[in-house]
Image: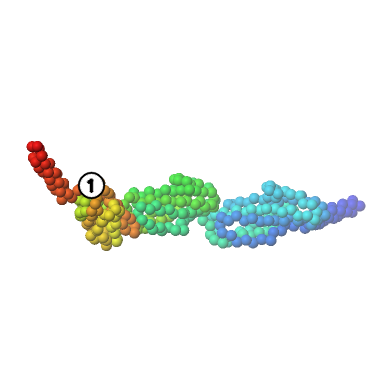
């Protein structure tokens, strides 16, 4: 009898267990996790945003523990609902709640498929896969869309560069340059001059690099290596400046004197010296003059075909004053000009009365004295 009672009790327990297990399965099948994007392909360092629905298809409110399982060591994530990080949520029968899942793919990661799951404990399992499209690395990238700029020697050259921190940690980089001697290199992260810059993980910083060549630099191509570095990682970039040469010249006389005397109505020859003080050939150097009214200025030659760097060429300026110029000082401005540059020199011209007028003046004085003497002798005795 006892044996039958024991068997009955054992059967009753087994039946109860089956009822409980069936109820659990029924409850489990009533909660469902869903997202339309179960397989995504991204490069290393990317951030993936998932929207996951938690549906309660049952007839009672369900409290559900949720978490993420299976992500690699360097992968990170956040699971939120209503703007808050959550571990459990309650869903009314026949309703759904939406979870926001953010998965950060590490920078240093192997290429290929990576599986993980979103788990609704004791209810459902949502399997997801991320396909990393390329092999990840721990590196820094220093790039410039336009790494070659051409200009004159007296110009400033500005390069727009990008520094990308392709690592999983914030990096502070020292900004360095190995420019030729005499060159000035200025780094401007966010348009502010600095010698170091901080870049967040997998972020990019815009850096403006200003290059100033030394005075009177020769024409040619110059390499400007720049570097962003710290103890963990570094990157180099080579900029290139093409100097087309400087255009400068001086206009003077062999003695440097810029004044002379001139008789009214007469001509005066002035020797001019044009010196090429730049680093490029001066071509088609033309002369012109700003002169007083009724004066003339002629040049011989009026155009110099070319002047090599460091060389001097002479020309002749013939200045003629007006016939009725009043004695005094006059200024004539002479200009030597090319399409690229020009030089000016102001000459002070002191005009004097012609010698003939001086003799005529003396003759008039003598005649006047003679007339007075004659009149004195003739009428003085009476």
x then y, percent, for residue 359: 14, 48
Coloring scheme used:
rainbow
Whether residue 190 sits left or right of residue 126 in the image: it is: left
x then y, percent, for residue 215: 33, 50
x then y, percent, for residue 316: 22, 57
Report which quarter residue 301 is drawn in: bottom left
Judge by depth and name the residue closer to the eye, 186 or 16: 186
Could you tell me which secondary element the residue under label 1 belongs to?
Answer: loop
Judge by depth and name the residue closer to the eye, 36 or 212: 212
Q: Residues within 10 Å of mark 1 (few under 14, many from 20)?
A: some
The residue furthest right is 1
Which residue is identified by label 1? 327
Judge by depth and name the residue closer to the eye, 334 or 165: 334
x then y, percent, for residue 82: 70, 49
Q: Residue at x 17, y 49 (%)?
A: 357
Residue 2 shows in this picture: yes
Judge by depth and name the residue closer to the eye, 176 or 118: 176
Q: Residue at x 26, y 52 (%)?
A: 251
Whether residue 124 sits left or right of residue 378 in the image: it is: right
Whether residue 3 sits left or right of residue 328 in the image: it is: right
- Of the 4 image quadrants, the one containing the C terminus is top left
Residue 220 shows in this picture: no
Q: Residue at x 14, y 44 (%)?
A: 368
Count numbered badges in the picture: 1
Report which quarter residue 282 is drawn in: bottom left
Q: Residue at x 26, y 48 (%)?
A: 330
């Amino acid at each position: 009898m006892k044996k039958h009672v024991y068997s009955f009790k054992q059967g009753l327990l087994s039946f109860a267990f089956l009822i409980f297990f069936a109820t659990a399965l029924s409850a489990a099948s009533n909660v469902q996790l869903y997202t339309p994007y179960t397989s995504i392909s991204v490069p290393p360092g990317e951030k993936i945003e998932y929207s996951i629905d938690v549906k309660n298809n049952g007839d009672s409110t369900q409290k559900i523990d949720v978490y993420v399982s299976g992500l690699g060591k360097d992968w990170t994530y956040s699971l939120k609902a209503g703007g808050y990080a959550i571990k459990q949520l309650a869903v009314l029968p026949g309703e759904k709640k939406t979870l926001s899942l953010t998965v950060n793919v590490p920078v240093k990661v192997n290429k290929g498929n990576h599986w993980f799951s979103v788990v609704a404990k004791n209810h459902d399992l949502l399997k997801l896969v991320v396909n990393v499209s390329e092999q990840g690395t721990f590196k820094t990238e220093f790039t410039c869309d336009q790494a070659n700029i051409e200009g004159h020697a007296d110009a400033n050259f500005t390069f727009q560069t990008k520094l990308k921190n392709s690592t999983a940690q914030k990096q502070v980089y020292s900004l360095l340059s190995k420019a030729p001697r005499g060159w000035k290199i200025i780094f401007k992260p966010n348009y502010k001059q600095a010698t170091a810059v901080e870049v967040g993980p997998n972020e990019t910083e815009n850096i403006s690099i200003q290059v100033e060549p030394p005075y009177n630099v020769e024409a040619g191509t110059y390499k400007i290596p720049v570097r962003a570095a710290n103890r963990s990682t570094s990157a180099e970039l080579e900029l290139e400046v093409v100097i087309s040469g400087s255009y400068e010249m001086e206009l003077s006389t062999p003695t440097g004197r810029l004044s002379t005397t001139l008789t009214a109505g007469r001509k005066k020859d002035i020797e001019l010296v044009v010196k090429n003080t730049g680093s490029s050939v001066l071509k088609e150097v033309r002369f012109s003059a700003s002169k007083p009214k009724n004066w003339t200025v002629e040049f011989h030659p009026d155009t110099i075909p070319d002047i090599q760097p460091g060389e001097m060429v002479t020309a002749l300026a013939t200045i003629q004053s007006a016939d009725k110029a009043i004695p005094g000082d006059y200024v004539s401005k002479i200009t030597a000009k090319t399409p690229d540059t020009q030089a000016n020199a102001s000459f002070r011209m002191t005009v004097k009365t012609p010698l003939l007028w001086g003799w005529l003046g003396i003759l008039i004085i003598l005649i006047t004295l003679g007339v007075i003497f004659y009149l004195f002798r003739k009428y003085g005795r009476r």
